[in-house]
Image (cartoon, rainbow, N blue to C red):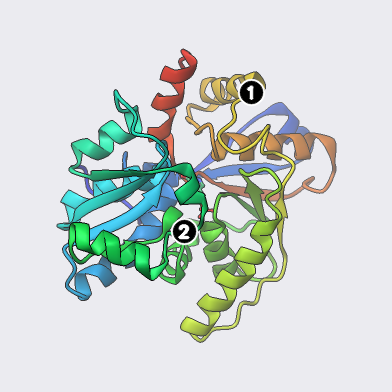
Amino acid sequence: MPKINENNIPLQKITANFLTQKKIELYVLREDLIHPEISGNKWRKLKYNLQEAKCKGFNQLLTFGGAYSNHIAATAAAGPDFGFKTIGIIRGDEISPLNATLQLAQGNGMIFKYISREQYRANNKYETTFIKELEKEYGQFYLVPEGGSNTLAVKGCTEIINNIKIDYDVICCACGTGGTLTGIIASVNNDKRVLGFSALKGGSFLEKDIRKLLFDYSVQYDCNIENMNWELITDYHLGGFAKIKPELIGFIREFKENHNVVLDFIYTGKMLFGLYDMIKNSSQFDNKTIIVVHTGGIQGNKGFEDRLNIAI
Ligand SMILES: *Cc1c(COP(=O)(O)O)cnc(C)c1O
């Protein structure tokens, strides 16, 4: 298992004519290089949860996710490295053969339990009766929430900016639950503009979740959140969560060809697609230095490439 590399994350400059014309400097913070399977924000979000679980004497982690979830893959991969057994509660019917994400997770020793979409959606995942049933089945475990977003996860995500050694005006990240964005908002100075690109359709409900995460974080760590200059961009889900349109595939291919950076289909591909569109169609970023956080997720690409019969 390769080691976690969280302190020497390169900032890769992206050069393109349209950026030069607008005097924009664009950098990708390569958090995807932290680890091939526990990549990007999923490491940041797990880090203090793993410490907490160890500290409290647990030897098992249990978490929730969809069949292509980067969080499932990351939690499974963290298991053997950090000395935990892992249990994944997977949304939907059992799939056979397993897709690439679940194969990877199983290879790292994760045990799966499939629950119906209805049961999953009923949103009783953290209800005590359901948890008690799971404890009866598996024994005591440390519960990592779906997508990994809790206050400890936000704390981990406040460390993302530590690797940025240059001055900048704007910082962007992709959003699912908003935990990563919350960590960035909580850590940057208030002269920075923070943009979150929602991977979900109608993602504005996320704003409420982010406010709650910010509040919980500020109470837990007794700190003031200074940065109010954050915004959720909800126009670039490109058909909805994990929906993949041809223009997105084209964009990701071109980005790899031009910059040798692989983006994922669900999050970072759509964020950069959106940012490019905004840069080209407005002047709000002219003369600015922009940092884009590559939150990883590349492990998920294989499953999509297999399913769509394409290669990036
Ligand atoms: C999970 C994930 C996100 C979303 O992170 P949240 O903290 O849930 O908003 C963004 N990018 C990638 C690559 C992810 O895997």
- Mark 2 to mark 1: distance in Å? 30 Å
Q: Nearer the viewer, residue 171 or 267?
A: 267
Tag 2, which secondary structure? helix
CB under 8 Å between discs 2 and 1: no
Q: Which residue is mark 1?
A: 245
- Give the residue at x 63% y 42%: 26
Q: Which mark is residue 137?
A: none
User: Would you say 129 lies left or right of 147 here?
Assistant: left
- Label 2 packing within 10 angstroms: few (<14), some (14-19), many (20+): many
Q: Which mark is residue 160?
A: 2
Q: Nearer the viewer, residue 163 or 126?
A: 126
Residue 224, by quadrant, is bottom right
User: Would you say 231 lies left or right of 174 here?
Assistant: right
Q: Position of residue 86 (x, y in %)?
A: 23, 52
Residue 232, by quadrant, is bottom right
Q: Between tags 2 and 1, which lies in front?
A: 1
Q: Position of residue 304 (x, y in %)?
A: 46, 25
For the N terminus, the quadrant is: top left
Q: Position of residue 251 (x, y in %)?
A: 62, 24
- Label 1 packing within 10 angstroms: few (<14), some (14-19), many (20+): few
Q: Nearer the viewer, residue 276 or 120?
A: 120
Q: Position of residue 14 (x, y in %)?
A: 59, 35
- Give the residue at x 34% y 29%: 95
Compared with residue 233, is residue 20 higher up or lower down, i.e. above or below?
above
Amino acid on which the number 2 mark rests in the picture: Ile
Q: Which comes sooner in the sequence, label 2 or label 1?
A: 2
Would residue 4 be seen by someone viewing this image from the given angle? no
Amino acid on which the number 1 mark rests in the picture: Lys
